[in-house]
Amino acid sequence: MILFSQPVGLSAFTGNPQMNLPAGYELFLSRLPQLEVVFGVGGIQLFPISALEAAQAGYAVGPQGQSLCGEAEGQWKSTWTVIGIETSLGDPIFVDSTSPESPVFSAQHGEGAWSPIPIATSLGTLAKILAEYGVMAEYRESLENLEEDNPKCVAFVERVEKLNDGKIKNEFWPSMLAS
């Protein structure tokens, strides 16, 4: 099932100094047909701009508003902004503003240290992957079980690799097909 939501404009963003929204983020959201793709018990949910400040809690910002960012390995970086979650386990989906392409990552929470896994080379690439992931979600609804070796799954993983110009090892997206 695909859920539809309307993105909110940047006027709703209050300017939290712990957030580094990439240039073009509002345009990215406005071009998405939906902010959530439900896939079995999991999926991807992106947040509207109005929810981004609250989404930084527990990542960039602590309960009292203190910064949780640091530059040591395994610490949350000040250049990372949570833009969504993987809905099965609640792992964050975030962008890194140090690169003009705004690469997108995920990382397992509750591990004691952050080990980012790249999932898209840019926000534009993420939009294309999410469109294809939505098609896979619709396909999955018509089946009782979607096996990893299903030709459509294999083709999706290959397409994700191609969309990322072969720069990203596919750890994340095959796991998203298993939910």
Image (cartoon, rainbow, N blue to C red):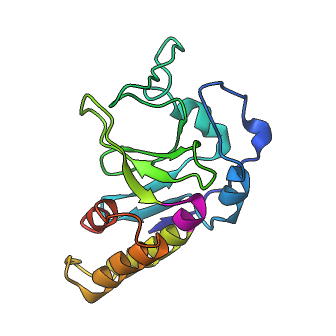
Q: Is residue 118 left or right of residue 146?
A: right
From this view, report whether residue 112 is shown above or below residue 170: above
> Image quadrant for the N terminus?
bottom left
Which residue is situated farthest in the right direction here? 11
Q: Residue at x 73, y 57 (%)?
A: 27
Q: In the image, is 26 to the left or to the right of 77? A: right
Q: Is-magenta flag for residue 126? A: yes
Which residues fall within the magenta stretch? 121-127
* Image location of residue 91, percent across then percent down: 36, 44
Where is residue 38 shown, x and y percent of the image? Answer: 41, 63
Is residue 152 found inside the magenta-colored segment of the image? no
Magenta stretch: dominant secondary structure: helix
Q: Position of residue 83 (x, y in %)?
A: 54, 45
Image point (60%, 38%), residue name: 51
Give residue 52's quadrant in the image. Answer: top right
119 sits left or right of 110 in the view: right
Count of numbered circles on the image: 0
When the figure is inspected, residue 10 is found, relative to residue 16, above or below; the finding is: below
Q: Is residue 33 above or below residue 107?
A: below
Q: Nearer the viewer, residue 121 or 9?
A: 121
What is the quadrant of residue 21 in the picture?
A: top right
Where does residue 131 sit, x and y in percent of width and height?
A: 52, 73
Q: Nearer the viewer, residue 83 or 72?
A: 72
Residue at 69 percent across and 65 percent down: it is 31
Locate the C terminus by quadrant.
bottom left
Q: Residue at x 52, y 53 (%)?
A: 103
